[in-house]
Image (cartoon, rainbow, N blue to C red):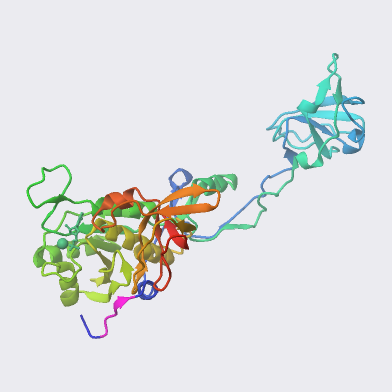
Amino acid sequence: MGEQTPYFVSVDEARAIADRTPLNTTAEVVGLELGDNRLLATDLISPIDDPPFDNSAMDGWAVQHQDTIHATPETPVTLAIIGTLPAGETSTTAAAVEAGQAMRIMTGAPMPEGADSIIQVEHTTVDESGQQVELHYPSKPNFIRRRGENISAGQMVFPVGTLLTPERLGLCATMGFGELQVQGKLKIAIISTGDEIIPVGQELKPGQIYESNSHGLAALVKWLGHAPTIHPNVADDLNSLRAALDEASRSADIIITSGGVSMGEFDFVRKIMEDEGDIHFWRVKLRPGSPPIFGTWKDIPIWGLPGNPVSSHVVFRILVAPWIRSQTNASGPREAKVRVRLADAVKVMADGLTLRRINLEFTPEGLVGRVTTHQGSNNLHGLATAGALTLLSPGTSGAVGEWIDALLL
Ligand code: AMP
Ligand code: MG
């Protein structure tokens, strides 16, 4: 590692350095049915007004409001029925509603000429002849849904980078888009290192543990809308590691490794990056998760995450995800920061962001946070059952009763 390599940097410095390492993004066209959790590659401008025409918000009667203003249950107003407009009515020749008249209308049917308001069916009765309707209340002009009140033609509805959530996909269909230009999914290679880790499905031998990081990291990659590939585990051995990184760099846009970035004799990810890679920073003021290394391997950005499962997850959330989001202009998935009152004390690190796992309780006074699980960075149960991570900067208090920021998990 050169003299100048940034070492033990703050979270903000790490993010700034990472942001100077660009990612190439591509675009592709997908059908709406495949748009879920993708990122728009272009601004989306509505070609149409929505609603495309004035229509009724109620099943009821289209009338002239002036006719109805004196209607009460005791002194109903009687109007002549002139026809029926169902939703989907396409004829433009429906009769105009004149004074003294009412047109039966269904929710979503176009407003007939002449009518300026709707009275819902529940407030009316039709006489025995079926020719007349009695109104027990005045009609309501605001039961008309106006053309363009939701979206107007030419409106920029979603900027580039918008994450297509279910509700946004629905709106894309409302605007009539059958296909969308989305960003290509980033191909993210995940490589776990360590002589002691074995894949699930095999029998544990003495000294071995199941490899878990790749599974959590792959799910985090998918959560961001990208494409993980879990590569075979790599032993603590320089040649195997070099071969694995070379292999990944031929196909991946980003490489994420776990393990082997600390100070130990067998921390070969750090060693190989020092000797053969390009390190942009190593170690971050973050607890848990201080060992990460970031740089490039054969020009491909590489994140060397710590092996401890809680640490690798936390570093992904705090550093890797924000970097990918900023490189892709992604609007999501959003990180929700909340205010929490501590019910248990948290020891705040003097030299780094303290991310303790807390459980949340909703109370009328707001969220209350408790430290209920073992906080060791190897103990994934604590993270898997936590509701949030504390975001405690150096110098802030983690005393009982403090209101602090926390990141929802
Ligand atoms: P390291 O960063 O390689 O020193 O690993 C730190 C700790 O995390 C050790 O106890 C490892 O056994 C454990 N560890 C490393 N990689 C993984 C993994 N992929 N899954 C589960 N635990 C791991
Ligand atoms: Mg290791």
Residue 21 appears anywhere in the view: no
Q: Residue furthest left?
A: 206
Residue 298 x %, y %:
23, 71
Pick the front one: 255 or 89: 255
Q: Residue furthest front?
A: 400
Q: Residue at x 29, y 65 (%)?
A: 289
Residue 255 lies left or right of residue 361; in this view the side is left
Quadrant of image for the N terminus: bottom left
Q: Residue furthest bottom?
A: 3
Q: Residue at x 36, y 60 (%)?
A: 317
Q: Quadrant of residue 108?
A: top right
- Quadrant containing ligand 2: bottom left
Q: Is residue 220 above or below residue 101?
A: below
Q: Is residue 316 above or below residue 179?
A: below
Range of the magenta residues?
A: 4-9
Residue 315 x %, y %:
32, 63
Pick the front one: 212 or 362: 362
Residue 92 lies left or right of residue 96; in this view the side is left
